Amino acid sequence: MGVVERQLALAAVALLAGAIALTATAHTHAAHHTSRLAAPLPAAVGSYSALVGAAGPETVGHRTACGATLGVGTLGVAHPTLPCGTLLYLTFGKRRVLTEVVDRGPYGPGRQFDVTTALARLLGLGGVQTVTWSYARVG
């Protein structure tokens, strides 16, 4: 076997090893993601009503008081006093979503919460509406 053939054979083995490693890594990530999705959701505690409105698309790219940058798909709420990261369920109509406090607010008058545009879309919320919310018990 010549030098060129040997280098090609080694390159093929390295490529095959890389493909196997990527497959194993993807499988591990998929299994981890699936196990997270299969984990039971936290229990809801309490039941409250609140006036809620969407913060609006102009908030995309905005750095929040909680230290995050809002993206197009960010699911979260702004609240004046609940700690950042507090998990909440918001229910509107037949849709219930587990979300978290990601910012201070609300920015609109009379509202108890502002929700991100993505969360408003997921809930089917248009304009300012009354929603039911509860804390999500963690631990």
Image (cartoon, rainbow, N blue to C red):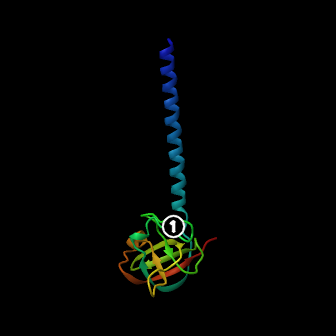
Q: Position of residue 38 (x, y in %)?
A: 52, 61
Indicate the position of residue 64 as horizontal and vertical percent values. 52, 69
Return the residue found at the far top.
2
Q: How many marks?
A: 1
Q: Which residue is mark 1?
A: 63
Image location (x, y in percent) of residue 106: 48, 80
Would you place residue 81 above or below residue 20 in this image?
Answer: below
Q: Position of residue 24 (x, y in %)?
A: 53, 42
Question: Closest to the observer: 105 or 33?
Answer: 105
SS for dot 1: loop
Residue at the limit of the structure toward the bottom, as seen here:
110
Q: Quadrant of residue 61?
A: bottom left
Above-or-below relation of 100 to 38? below
Q: Residue at x 55, y 81 (%)?
A: 80
Q: Residues within 10 Å of mark 1 (few under 14, many from 20)?
A: some
Residue 124: quarter of image: bottom left
Query: Residue 72, relative to residue 115: is it above or below?
Result: above
Looking at the picture, tell me which residue is in the foreground, 21 or 115.
115
| Disc 1 residue type (three-letter) | Arg
> Quarter of the image containing the C terminus?
bottom right
* Residue shown at the point (46%, 78%) measured from the top left: 114
Q: Residue at x 51, y 36 (%)?
A: 20
